[in-house]
Amino acid sequence: MRVGTIDFLTIKNDKGAFNLTFNAPKPVFGVTHDGGEILILGTNKNMVKTLSKLGLNNADRIDIGTLLAIAYNTVRDGKRESYIHSFLPASRPHLIYQNHEFLVSGGRYVFIDSGINDR
């Protein structure tokens, strides 16, 4: 299910915390039908260059780090709204880059009508 678009992701790894921003077109923020998984669709295939600037290797699968927050836009009640969800420490998923796509792995959260809710 399509929720909106992603403005940035805040990530923490052994190099510190940083924001991963996206140029237009922004990736689509989606969730599975049960709200149990975040989907990031349509990421830029040139993201490997950005990741290498951050000191991450150019492997087929890159564990970027722990996802601390997600900033996204969506339409709610006919109005465009912006949200930033900061995950609680026990709920934080990992962000993986594989085959030119981002994968959100693990974490304890669910997406419902009001947005992302930590468990």
Image: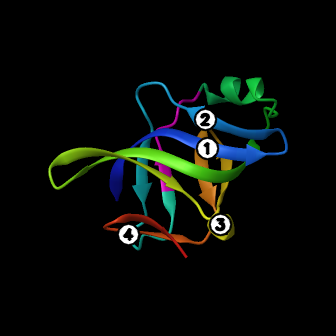
Alpha carbon separation for disc pair 1 and 4: 25 Å
43 on left or right of 35? right
Query: What residue type is disc 2 on?
Result: Leu
Residue at 61% across, 43% down:
10
Q: Nearer the viewer, residue 20 or 27?
A: 20
Q: Which residues are magenta?
A: 39-45
Callout 2 crowding tier (Cα within 10 Å): few <14, some 14–19, many ≥20: some
Alpha carbon separation for disc pair 3 and 2: 19 Å
Q: Nearer the viewer, mark 3 or mark 2?
A: 2
Which residue is identified by label 2? Answer: 20
Helix, strand or loop status at disc 3:
loop
Mark toward the start of the polypeptide (3 vs 1): 1
Which residue is identified by label 1? Answer: 10
Alpha carbon separation for disc pair 4 and 2: 26 Å
Q: Quadrant of residue 91?
A: bottom right
Q: Label 1 near label 3: C-beta < 8 Å?
A: no
Query: What residue type is disc 3 on?
Result: Gly
Mark toward the start of the polypeptide (1 vs 2): 1
Residue 89 in view? yes
Q: Nearer the viewer, residue 71 or 100?
A: 71
Residue 63 in view? no
Q: Label 2 near label 3: C-beta < 8 Å?
A: no
Q: Label 4 near label 1: C-beta < 8 Å?
A: no
Callout 1 crowding tier (Cα within 10 Å): few <14, some 14–19, many ≥20: many
Which residue is identified by label 4? Answer: 33
Alpha carbon separation for disc pair 3 and 1: 16 Å
